Image: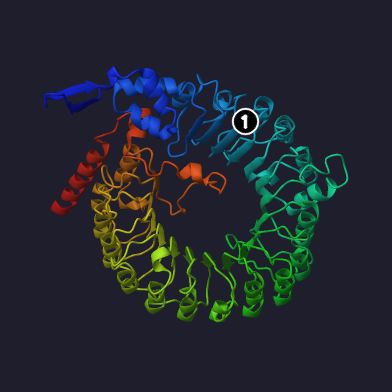
Amino acid sequence: MATTVVLDADGFDEERSLDMLPAALLETIMTKLDVASLCSLASTCKTLKSCVSRVLTFTPNFHLFNVSLSMETVRPLLFPNQQLSSLKLDCGRLGNSAIDVLARPSLREISLHNCRDFSGDLISEIGKKCKDLRLLCLGSVAEKVGRTVTRGALEDLLNGCSHLEVLALMFDLSLYLRPGDGRIFGLASDKLTHLELGHISSRMMTHLLTSTGQGSGGRALQNVQQLRLSVDCITDAVVKAISNSLSSLIDLDLRDAPLEDPRQLSDLTDFGLQEINQNGKLKRLSLIRSQEFHSAYFRRVSDQGMLFLAGKCLGMESICLGGFCRVTDAGFKTILHSCASLSKFSVYHGPKLTDLVFHDVLATALSLSHVSLRRNIRDEALQAVSHLRKLKVLLLDGTDVSDIGLSYLKEGVWDSLVSLSVRGCRNLTDKFMTTLFDGSSKLALRELDVSNLPNLTDAAVFALAKSGAPITKLQLRECRLIGDPSVMALASTRVYEDECPGSSLCLLDLYDCGGITQLSFKWLKKPFFPRLKWLGITGSVNRDIVDALARRRPHLKVSCRGEELGIDGEDDWDSADIQQHMEAEEDELEQWILGDEGDVEMEDAEDESDDEGSEEEEE
């Protein structure tokens, strides 16, 4: 029972219980809170737990991405609520048996991540039951062996949800549909403004757009303003079909990752770029050829193509280009000098891009807030970048910048920079960290990636910890000289006036850091790092302790295989809600939902490890 100590009229201590407050008052206050906060309250006392249980029967929003709940936990939390209108959930521990709980007629928004153990029945039932749905985001559907998605399930969805405005199907549709089946998207709501597909063949997308221009469903996608597609190969045909068919398009994001070099006749060319933005409404453009599986490039696009594109992108605010191996500084400068409103400029895998592209950037009217560059960039470029006063995000992975180059940032944009990545910049040492994090000013920096820097040591992390910078995402992977002292320093960090140790870190990646031992795990337990949601570590350090930590902090996603950390499927539409409770208190959520089991597991694992170590020493 929660009590409050107050002074009565005579100055004597008096205890008052929450039981004295009307339940209706407490419940009214609780309706203003999100689900994670409600769960935190429920763990404090029986009175609040009872109130929370009642509030959850009529709360309109149930948003919870930080914990993957089991069926036994989800059913009592959701089933009694007949007024639920927005459901956003991590379904990593759920399967088809949860469909009747998740597909509710009252829902207007559904965002479900990690739906690996669901089949197409989930999609079908949503279409049949959720007639008033406005937003649907489904991630990783049917990725588990034995699950599948049928064309009929997609038809049920598109026929049933006639009011959809946002649709994101973040899984590989090409596994379940034939090239001609793409036309079923002609059944989509005419209110649809945002469409994102995890993977679809370019042939299927071209067929969809060209065929819908002729039949009764021809105007189904006419109102789409934001289109994000991952295709097998970006071609002139698919670019032309998108530009000619989607007259309202404002945001276009196309990505591919070919397993081999595309055939010359079917690849993107200069003339394909000329087709982009025929209606002149495009504000954001991203054309990325990923090298995840193969070192593939757009080999038929040259500086002439960039000249064609520059003529069509005068009003664009964001341009991201990846894999244009024949485009030189001249081509990229044409873009920079043509787009007066440009705030974000990113180039990936552009081997002919050099410092020269930025030498006269100050002569333009640009006010870039996001700059991302790769390869061939040296300190001279950072001198120009440091004068971009509105810069918030700077990504320099794999470039040849040095400590001196990064020191230029101190003179210009450093205090306002929010995200910095220097992954793989092998010329860097501790000096750039001690220069930038000297504690002379309060920083806005939230994300820092210093992975794969062979000369970085614990001294660099000490400087970061001492500065009190409010870092939420710190990546130190593959820094072989980083060890236990860094973890201890981060665990003890005070973020400016914040009294909670290590309070700001939500993601910490220590994968393959050479000096990490079991000592670090003592500092990864509560109460240290109370807001940590993702942790990357080398599993071979001590598998029993890693497993015990994962069980002790079930809300913490522990990765031991080296994969990149973060939320799968997170996008701009949901990011505010996903991050809404990242600043939550310690782990009250898991205490209430998941119980308080396993308090001593990690200590037992450590004791066993210590015993084994002692035995080895004696031998």
Q: In this rendering, is residue 196 above or below 84?
A: below
The N terminus lies in which quarter of the figure? top left
The answer, for residue 182, to whether it is visible in the render is yes
Query: Residue 118 appears in which quarter of the rendering?
Result: top right
View extreme (front): residue: 9
Query: What is the x, y in percent for residue 271?
Result: 78, 68
The answer, for residue 52, to whether it is visible in the render is no
Viewer-nearest residue: 522 or 473: 473
Colour scheme employed for the rendering of this structure: rainbow
Query: Residue 401 appears in which quarter of the rendering?
Result: bottom left
Q: In this rendering, is residue 461 above or below 192?
A: below
Query: What is the x, y in percent for residue 72?
Result: 45, 24
**Left or right for 425, reference 312:** left
Query: What is the x, y in percent for residue 407?
Result: 38, 75
> Which element type, helix, strand or loop, lies under badge 1?
helix
Query: What is the x, y in percent for residue 359?
Result: 54, 81
**Left or right for 29, reference 2:** right
Which residue shows up at 79% across the image and 47% down it?
Answer: 208
Dot 1: few (<14), some (14–19), or many (≥20) neighbours within 10 Å?
many
Q: Mark 1 points at which residue?
A: 122
**Left or right for 221, reference 7:** right
**Left or right for 408, reference 316:** left
What amino acid type should be assigned to the residue bearing mark 1? Leu
Q: In this rendering, is residue 423 above or below 206?
A: below
